[in-house]
Amino acid sequence: MTKRTKPTSHNVVPMKARFAIPRQDMPEQNPTKRAGNFLEVNLGLTADQAVIEAQRCIECGNPTCMEGCPVSIKIPDFIQLICNRDFAKAAAKIKEDNSLPAVCGRVCPQETQCEEVCVVGKRFEPVAIGRLERFVADYERLHPEEMSTESVVAESTGKNVAIVGSGPAGLATAADLIKAGHAVTVFEALHEFGGVLVYGIPEFRLPKEILRKEVAALESLGVKFIKNFIVGRTQTVHELLNEEGFDAMFLGLGAGLPRFMNIPGENLNGVYSANEFLTRSNLMRGYEFPDYDTPLYRAEHAITVGGGNTAMDAVRTSKRLGANHATIVYRRSEEEMPARNEEIHHAKDEGVHVMTLINPIEFIGDENGFVKSARCLKMALGEPDDSGRRRPIPIEGSEFEIPADMVVIAVGNGSNPLISQTTPEISTNKWGNVVTDEIGRTSMKGVFAGGDIVTGGATVILAMGAGRAAAEGINEYLKTGEWV
Amino acid sequence: MALSDIIKNMSFDEIIKLCCDQEQEAVNLYTELRNRATDDAAKLKFQELVDMETQHLVNLQTFEIEKYMDLPPANLKVTDYLTEPSKDRNLTTQEALILAAKREDKTAKLYQDLAHFFKDNVELNTFFQMMADEELRHKHDLETEYEDEFLQEG
Ligand SMILES: Cc1cc2nc3c(=O)[nH]c(=O)nc-3n(C[C@H](O)[C@H](O)[C@H](O)COP(=O)(O)OP(=O)(O)OC[C@H]3O[C@@H](n4cnc5c(N)ncnc54)[C@H](O)[C@@H]3O)c2cc1C
Ligand code: SF4
């Protein structure tokens, strides 16, 4: 590994005084107001706040923050550029390793990644790396005139690569491959590009305008985007490779198949998968009904089952759509919720009620087949098992009912079997995930895969990291033709 | 005639043979479901279930008490309240796990009943209790897998 050179320091605050600087709070919309609109909740740091926050960094010799970042962004370097108010250069520095910083700055679980291992965080609050990343990425978007216009695209290699799926995995792969000089075409099943970032994560957490700009930037580099194209149905993998002249392919299909609980009453009217509910609201703009003609049920008592980011997005959406009682029902305790801490806090601030150690066992309908309540059981955490986890166990006889005229199931997603069914040469495991090696090679020559389709539901940055690793693998394959 | 009455007059070897038949039935069921599955992922899961039951069958055929000594872990009851999938359709991996965990639970209950029935016969009581524990261990493993994969709540 090459030794990393420490960036030039631009921090004018003496070392000891840095610990006295409080972590800068991100301005946000007032909770009562925002619970009634879909505008972004967080408003971003101001430039002065960003500089102050950057000055909290103590410029560690061994910057553990970089190890905590799945794509090893050069965090100390971009922080020093912020200290110097060189925001455009800071953005360029992040982009060396992460092509979607405005997204990651908003949705990455920094508290379990870079910020968790920040040295300042051992005694004080960690440097707000995510907020700084977001700040410089937004600065870049708002000040295009300051960005370098130098061409980043290498000379054409004459090779064609097909990318299936325009989520973070597909976009990251496309960005690296177009820069390497290949012709890149992205095929997307839906009518907008961005994967979960557009159909899953709501506008109030990630404005869609950001994605549109990122896609436009890739288009300007030469990436061709084709929408409403379902690989496996519109055309198969074989047809694309053998008849359409693609030399290699990357599958970034995501994990878009909703999972249900398999309990009675799940097929009642008013019971949605989180996928359907969020897609209707975000992608089909149901939240702007009647301007957009996607109907969405306006509930009085909306419950969402689950404790992850998807559940938080769904319950906060139901609140914004007018539910007076928007409730999370989660079978474990709050400590085990996989959602980002910030989302849990934001949800509570907005009036979401969180019920933990509760699990629905049946949904009960009215005479017209609409859900009216959920029968639930109380749970208790069992003794730690071999993995140290305390698993929830139902308490016999603890059944009770809660009113629910809408239910959103957010217990997880699986992978869509379409590609594996139409291309049996691509091996999958028992969960339906595509099997690859560490550089993303599948069992079919020339076909790579990465992101949620390989790992199952994970995170944006892991999907992007997998996309970048696969892009390297594709470059190598296109150069040598070797597949061993 | 009730199963317990039949067993009462059997030798220990005959009882083991009866339990082996029970395990063989499970092997046959999972083999059939594996062959019928159109979903590759579910096929793999059913194959794992065939392997698990085959191993149990072998253990029974070469019965050694040591293999059955450990107490079963807690009953997680993850699948107790879930709808049992119909065996007549093509099942998914998720349904395969529910079906198998429920089957282990039912078999454990059968062995527990037999252990209770033979409470005055130390040898048979211990044997059936161990058999029940083994089924509960399988149920625990299946439910842990179910929880880790299908209740990620991410
Ligand atoms: C509601 C929700 C909230 C989340 N919140 C966070 C968060 O806060 N932070 C975080 O880090 N992660 C979060 N995640 C997880 C994160 O979004 C995913 O891990 C990530 O998007 C995976 O990226 P991907 O590119 O692998 O797949 P996706 O983003 O799922 O993209 C896959 C794309 O492929 C397309 N596609 C699929 N099949 C075909 C086909 N046959 N032909 C053509 N196109 C196809 C799909 O339409 C989709 O656009 C969240 C997930 C959800 C659902
Ligand atoms: S670990 Fe924290 S203090 Fe150290 S370089 Fe990284 S951000 Fe700065």
Image (cartoon, grey):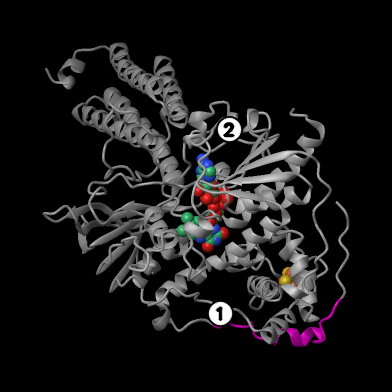
Question: Which chain does the numbered disc 2 sit on?
Answer: A
Disc on the earlier residue, 2 or 1? 1
- Left or right, A369 with respect to B80, comes to left
Task: Mark 1: give few (<14), some (14-19) or many (20+) Cα within 10 Å.
Answer: few
Question: Which chain does the numbered disc 1 sit on?
Answer: A
Q: Is residue A463 at all visible to an observer of this figure?
A: no
Closer-to-camera residue (A271/B45): A271
What is the number of callouts on the image? 2
Expressed as whole percent of the image width and height from the top left, the position of residue A78 reads: 77, 71
Expressed as whole percent of the image width and height from the top left, the position of residue A32 reads: 39, 82
Give the labeled residue for mark 2: A237
Q: Secondary structure at mark 2?
A: helix
The amino acid type of the residue labelled 1 equals Leu
Q: Residue at x 64, y 60 (%)?
A: A216
Closer-to-camera residue (A382/A79): A79
Q: Is residue A444 magenta?
A: no
> Which numbered disc, 2 or 1, marks the residue closer to the eye?
2
Q: Secondary structure at mark 1?
A: loop
- Left or right, A332 with respect to A17, comes to left
The image quarter containing residue A240 is top right
Q: Residue at x 43, y 73 (%)?
A: A38
Task: Provide the residue span drawn in magenta.
Answer: A9-27
Q: Quadrant of the N terminus of chain B?
A: top left
Closer-to-camera residue (B154/A210): A210
The answer to whether residue B18 is above or below residue A436 is above
Do the numbered discs 2 and 1 sit on residues whose CB atoms are within 8 Å? no
Q: Main secondary structure of the magenta part?
A: loop
Give the labeled residue for mark 1: A43
The amino acid type of the residue labelled 2 equals Val
User: Residues under labels 2 and 1: Cα distance?
Assistant: 43 Å
